[in-house]
Image (tube, rainbow, N blue to C red):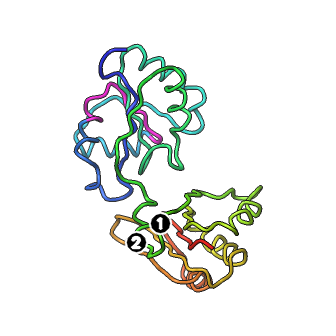
Amino acid sequence: MPHGAKLFLVPTPIGNLEDITLRAVRVLREVDLVLAEDTRTTGFLLKRLNISTRLQSHHKFNEHQTADRIAELIAQGKSVALVSDAGTPGVSDPGFLLVRTCIEKGVEVECLPGATAFVPALVGSGLPCDRFCFEGFLPQKKGRQSKIAALQGEERTMIFYESPRRLLKLLEQLAQAFGGSRRASVSRELSKLHEETLRGTLAELALHFSQKEPKGEIVVVVEGR
């Protein structure tokens, strides 16, 4: 395989554009193709960075069809970068399938370090962060209650992603399963102008968000048993 032909996983800012790394900018500028979860979102970012690399759509609805083709393209000598709308590709975003396909086909994969939402939320929560489990988005309907029940005995700090309109429901369900006195934090709009982290018990946080509707991207961190 020609030198430089590989899949690069490139983290992008979760809000603040200053969080892009110098290395990420260089890679996005030098590769032959950038795969984007949403070409409009990434197009805006690349324009701000004065990067004109060709963009192609790669998201959860088409990744099964495109993974083999992309891996073949890299095997033929092209360098490709994969980005999600925000943060590190593959973490609650498309990417895993393409990475696995490339590895199976002997294509080199390199992941750059960079922005991801759960790390600042975890470290800033005040809860133990030496051992933790990342749960991402819980199932919306089928399997949701059984998943929460399965976590009742979890001793590590737990991390969840949630949408603003389902946050209150999540806090109430976790309080019911784990007990309302369990400590937790809710971080929203991380790295953005209105960044906020609220800390308290699950019961206190549920009460707060029952009175004040949350906005923005949300990370919930919950103390282990």
> What secondary structure is found at the residue carrying circle 2?
loop
| Callout in the foreground (1, 2) | 2
Whether 36 is drawn above or below 3: the answer is below
Mark 2 highlights which residue?
124
Asked where in the image residue 134 lies, by quadrant, the reply is: bottom right
Residue 28 forms part of the magenta stretch: yes
Amino acid identity at mark 1: Gly
Where residue 19 appears, as percent x and y from the top left, is: 29, 55
Q: Which residue is located at x 69 percent, y 68 percent?
A: 153
Whether 132 is drawn above or below 8: the answer is below
Where residue 152 appears, as percent x and y from the top left, is: 70, 69
Mark 2 neighbour density, 10 Å: few (under 14) some (14–19) many (20 or more):
some
Amino acid identity at mark 2: Gly
Residue stretch in magenta: 27-38
Q: Where does the C terminus fall, quadrant-wise?
A: bottom right
Mark 1 neighbour density, 10 Å: few (under 14) some (14–19) many (20 or more):
some
Locate residue 104 relative to residue 76 in the image: left or right. Answer: right
Locate residue 175 relative to residue 48 in the image: left or right. Answer: right
Q: Which residue is located at x 25 percent, y 56 percent?
A: 18
CA–CA distance in space, label 1 to label 2: 18 Å
Locate residue 220 relative to residue 46 in the image: left or right. Answer: right
Mark 1 highlights which residue?
216
Whether 22 is drawn above or below 4: the answer is below
Where residue 36 appears, as percent x and y from the top left, is: 43, 38
